[in-house]
Image (spheres, grey):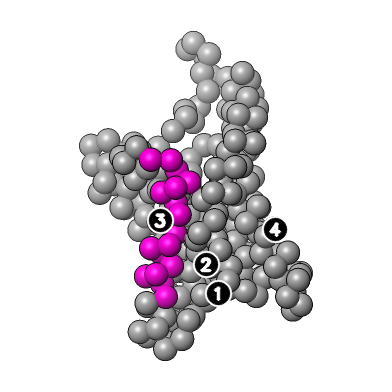
Amino acid sequence: MRPLIIMHGENIDWCHTVIRMLMYLVGVAVLALGMSLQTASGLGVAALTCFATTLSMLTGKTLGFWITATYVAYIVAQLAILRSEFQPRILLELFFSTLIGGLTDLFMAVNPLHPTALPTQIATMLLSLAVTAFGVVNMGVVPNAPDGLVQVIAEKLKRRFGDVKVVFDCSHVAASLALSLIFMYNLGGFGVTTAISALFLGHVINVANKLFAQRFIRAAFGK
């Protein structure tokens, strides 16, 4: 995980530190937009939010509320895995969790895209995958809580982030689907978008990393 505050010797490089923080906030907003687009496609919800969606259906509380709640649980999981290696900076994910929950509810409320024809639904779904991947790569400061957990697991297992994310998302979807079938006797928010995002979003992120990660690093660090 790269440093939050950029230093030149003993002096803080405020210019690049501000750029880095702005990249983080843009990444939060873009990721929330991507998740709202996945839901708006009408082909099921994103793998990243399927568990929160199931809980929202069961309780009547908003998707944003449960995104925040589940993300906090992922931070606790990181603490359990890292123990003495846990960095206090990871607690910044708490801020992210609250912000992305609110932004997701906002984007879902104002999103004008509600396609009904299959071609436009598929186009919206593919767009949402690209937007989500871009948001993940552009976070720049602290990853979102589930991706932070994936990152911790990937580092412990010495595997690529995108590969671990595919396994994480697929197990996440399986747990959500089981919960929906047991308590609601239906598939809940599961659909084509859920399956495709679980199987391929990690690989899309790998591609986005190759295309954009170094550019974002140069923008944030000036090198």
Mark 1–mark 4 distance (CA, rounded to whole Å): 16 Å
Q: Which residues are magenta?
A: 159-177
Residue picked out by circle 1:
191
Left/right of residue 213 with respect to residue 81 in the rendered view? right
Circles 3 and 2: CB atoms closer than 8 Å: no
For the image shown, how many numbered marks are present on the structure? 4
Circles 2 and 1: CB atoms closer than 8 Å: yes
Q: Is residue 204 visible?
A: yes
Residue picked out by circle 3:
167
Residue picked out by circle 4:
127
Mark 2–mark 1 distance (CA, rounded to whole Å): 7 Å
Residue at 58 percent of width and 49 percent of height: 204
Q: Residues within 10 Å of mark 3 (few under 14, many from 20)?
A: some
* Label 2 secondary element: helix
Q: Quadrant of the N terminus?
A: top left
Instruction: Tell me, yes or no, whether the highlighted magenta stretch contains residue 16.
Output: no
Front position among marks 4 and 2: 2
Residue at 61 percent of width and 69 percent of height: 39
Q: Amino acid at mark 4?
A: Leu
Residue picked out by circle 2:
195
Q: Residue furthest left?
A: 84
Q: Position of residue 223 (x, y in %)?
A: 61, 18
In which quadrant of the rendered view does residue 171 lie? bottom left
* Label 3 secondary element: helix
Q: Amino acid at mark 2?
A: Ala
Q: Residues within 10 Å of mark 1 (few under 14, many from 20)?
A: some
Mark 3–mark 2 distance (CA, rounded to whole Å): 12 Å
In which quadrant of the rendered view does residue 16 lie? top right
Q: Residues within 10 Å of mark 4 (few under 14, many from 20)?
A: some
* Label 1 secondary element: loop
